[in-house]
Amino acid sequence: MKINNKEIIGNRFFFDGCHKIYIIEDNQDIEDMKQKNWTDEDIYPIEELEETYHNSCSLRFISNCKLNKQYVKQCEDEDKVIFTN
């Protein structure tokens, strides 16, 4: 999957139920996020990413858990965000 031509590395993501979306790239991401009080219930399969993004609040963003990759900036215009497989 790609977002705006940026390839996503990972097959799951964390979602807070509102606007925070973090791509899980490796098992260390899961451990690190759990130390920040995220749980297994916050993890979703990557196949649900596009729908989750479109159904989340307008403050939404998509980053990786390490915060060194940003796929969608916070409050980015939804019309400018393109998901491809």
Image (spheres, grey):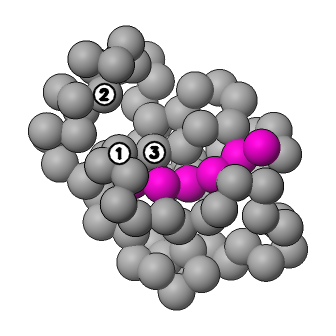
**Numbered mark located on residue 33 in the image:** 2
Of callouts 1 and 2, which one flags the residue occurring earlier in the amino acid sequence? 2
Give the structural element (helix, strand or loop) at label 2. helix
Type of amino acid at the residue the image marks with label 1 = Cys
Give the extent of the magenta segment: 59-64
What's the CA distance linking mark 1 and mark 2? 7 Å
Q: Is residue 82 above or below residue 37?
A: below
Q: Please give the residue where the numbered disc 3 appears in the rendered image.
A: 22
Tell me if label 1 and label 2 are in contact, CB under 8 Å. yes
**Numbered mark located on residue 65 in the image:** 1
Type of amino acid at the residue the image marks with label 3 = Tyr
Q: Quadrant of residue 10?
A: bottom left
Q: Residue 50: image x %, image y %? A: 64, 57
Residue lying at 17% horizontally and 48% vertically, measured from the top left: 26
Q: Residue 76: image x %, image y %? A: 77, 64
Main structural element of the magenta stretch: helix, strand or loop? strand
